[in-house]
Image (cartoon, coloured by chain):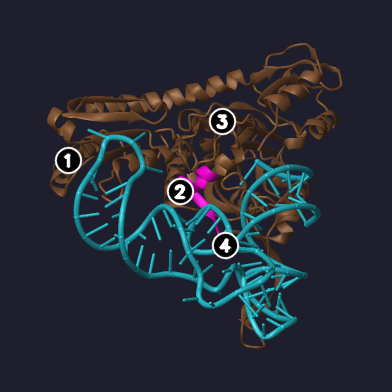
Chain colours: A brown, B cyan
RNA sequence: CGGGGUGUAGCGCAGUUGGUUAGCGUACCUGCUUUGGGAGCAGGUGGUCGUCAGUUCGAGUCUGACCACCCCGACCA
């Protein structure tokens, strides 16, 4: 076990904090609630971006960029929207600084007050729909399928690296459609893209479903989410997609002429996935040795560590190592060769385990003599010595296998921690003892949901798309219910 | 934003009743020996003691305000 990492089973929250810092993913900055994403952490984000961007483009979307600042009045146009975000907005009020009277410091120039204050975007629906108004006249202008990669600011009271920070990075898709059906299909398509990404790239099993009215995005008619279970039994929402109806079109007066010449408001969706998913990645797979990264998102999939006694030996080993590296790279595998001589091999082994590198190759004099390499996999920590001739083939197989087996492991964990519960006492007890996902009947009212939240801190994470029709009674009120919904305490 | 806690070298910490030149471990630098699971010895560098103000002959130590971080609540992706 890593000596300097808090034990996961003793203090999960501290283990997470330690891990983010010690694996060199991110750190707190001088600005309250804002993090510095360090190169190793940012490399994961870049991989997430690359995969998602490819998937967005494959589904017909293009990228664009809209301003960081949003005129205050834009927010006020959609009532639910402004209400949802009002409490966490950062606001720009001035545009100039000047030297203080005493000449020592600088102050905000009171004469440089903005006519209209600017909100730093917590999300971009309003500024984007203000543009869409000018872009859309006819059904021929539709659909508009735009995504933007951006930072947003939500002034959070209590922050945690990746999971909740005042500023975070994300992508936000904003689409405009001629019909309600088309927009709803788009919202569903994108939640499916997210689920595909989560399961296949992040190796994170997720449950797709509808949000209850309470949990819905401010301004949306319907919100879909993917929900994942973390190792401490809490749920984490990893991506959301919203069917916005005509709410923003009406707020920004975006109408189009349809084929029959009739004027109608445009139908909208929006969907987003943030740096928070890096937190999910950490909490879903990692252990007491450190991070466990899925090969598809790891900054490098293989690390090669030379074992040597003197510079001459290092040179020989490096020659062999570089050959292996270039062979692996040709096969499309990302590789780091760590030939630094200021740390011992043992130190490097522990360090790359902490950083979650999927596969480690060790190459020493013994291997040179025998034409072998030691291969170790991060997820199971198992190692074996193989002929150097079969390295590429072996590593390729291992990478695929690790990707699949950490997904299976996470899914197995979820299965074991999903409970079908029909009695209120069991519901409360399970939450307190084990946490996890609880599938239970609900009478469909916001009032009941609110009371359950007050009494247990559990919320409806989603109403799963695939929940079967089943006659039952609400876990709280005893009123009739037709399907189970997913309850959990959440991040 | 409410309650609790913590700020001393990059990191982890000690520092007595307010008293001389602020110390230990680790990391870092140099040298030698090492290197198949976080190496050893020797020497060395590194400090506005979170910030600002106050009390005092004298403040890391006492007082106040502020800032940051951690934990628990309310709010949220």
Element under label 1? helix
Whether labels 1 and 3 share one chain: yes
- What's the chain of the residue with tag 1? A
- What's the chain of the residue with tag 2? A
Residue at 51% across, 43% down: A19
**Spatial CA span between label 1 and label 2:** 28 Å
Q: Residue A240, relative to residue A472: is it above or below?
A: below
Q: Are marks 2 and 4 in contact (CB under 8 Å)?
A: no
Labels 2 and 4: the sequence-earlier one: 2
Labels 1 and 3: the sequence-earlier one: 3
Is residue A53 part of the magenta span, yes or no? no
Residue corresponding to mark 2: A24
Residue corresponding to mark 1: A317
Which dot, 1 or 3, sits closer to the camera? 1
**Residue nearest the observer in this picture, A387 or A479:** A387
Residue corresponding to mark 3: A189
């Amino acid at each position: 076990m890593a000596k300097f990492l808090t034990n996961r089973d003793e203090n999960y929250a501290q283990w997470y904090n330690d891990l983010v810092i010690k694996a060199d993913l991110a750190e707190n900055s001088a600005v309250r609630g804002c993090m510095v994403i360090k190169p190793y952490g940012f490399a994961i984000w870049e991989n997430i971006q690359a995969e998602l961007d490819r998937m967005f483009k494959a589904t017909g979307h293009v990228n664009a960029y809209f301003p960081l600042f949003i005129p205050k009045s834009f927010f006020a146009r959609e009532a639910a929207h402004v209400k949802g975000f009002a409490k966490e907005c950062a606001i720009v009020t001035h545009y100039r600084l000047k030297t203080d009277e005493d000449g020592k410091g600088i102050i905000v120039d009171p004469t440089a007050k903005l006519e209209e204050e600017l909100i730093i975007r917590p999300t971009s629906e309003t500024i984007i729909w203000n543009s869409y108004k000018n872009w859309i006249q006819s059904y021929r202008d539709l659909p508009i399928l735009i995504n933007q990669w951006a930072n947003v600011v939500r002034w959070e009271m209590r922050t945690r690296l990746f999971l909740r920070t005042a500023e975070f990075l994300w992508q936000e898709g904003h689409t405009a459609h001629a019909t309600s059906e088309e927009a709803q299909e788009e919202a569903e398509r994108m939640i499916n893209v997210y689920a595909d990404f989560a399961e296949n790239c992040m190796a994170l099993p997720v449950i797709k479903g509808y949000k209850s009215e309470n949990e819905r995005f401010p301004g949306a008619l319907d919100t879909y989410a993917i929900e994942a279970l973390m190792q401490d039994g809490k749920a984490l929402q990893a991506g959301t997609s919203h069917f916005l109806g005509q709410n923003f079109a009406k707020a920004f007066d975006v109408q189009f002429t349809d084929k029959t010449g009739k004027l109608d408001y445009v139908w909208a969706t929006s969907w987003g996935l943030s740096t928070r998913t890096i937190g999910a990645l950490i909490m879903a797979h990692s252990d007491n040795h450190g991070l466990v990264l899925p090969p598809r998102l790891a900054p490098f999939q293989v690390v090669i560590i030379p074992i040597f006694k003197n510079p001459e030996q290092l040179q020989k080993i490096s020659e062999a190592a570089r050959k292996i590296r270039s062979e692996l790279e040709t096969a499309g595998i990302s590789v780091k060769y760590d030939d630094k001589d200021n740390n011992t091999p043992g130190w490097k082994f522990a360090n790359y385990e902490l950083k979650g590198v999927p596969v480690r190759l060790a190459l020493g004099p013994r291997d040179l003599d025998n034409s072998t390499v030691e291969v170790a996999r991060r997820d199971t920590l198992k190692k074996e010595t193989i002929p150097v001739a079969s390295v590429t083939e072996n590593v390729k197989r291992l990478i695929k296998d690790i990707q699949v087996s950490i997904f299976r492991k996470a899914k197995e964990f979820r299965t074991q921690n999903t409970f079908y519960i029909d009695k209120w006492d069991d519901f409360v007890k399970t939450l307190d003892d084990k946490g996890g996902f609880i599938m239970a009947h609900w009478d469909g009212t916001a009032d009941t949901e609110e009371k359950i939240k007050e009494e247990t801190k559990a919320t409806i994470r989603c109403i799963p798309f695939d929940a079967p029709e089943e006659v039952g009674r609400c876990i709280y009120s005893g009123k009739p219910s037709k399907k189970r919904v997913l309850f959990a305490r959440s991040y």
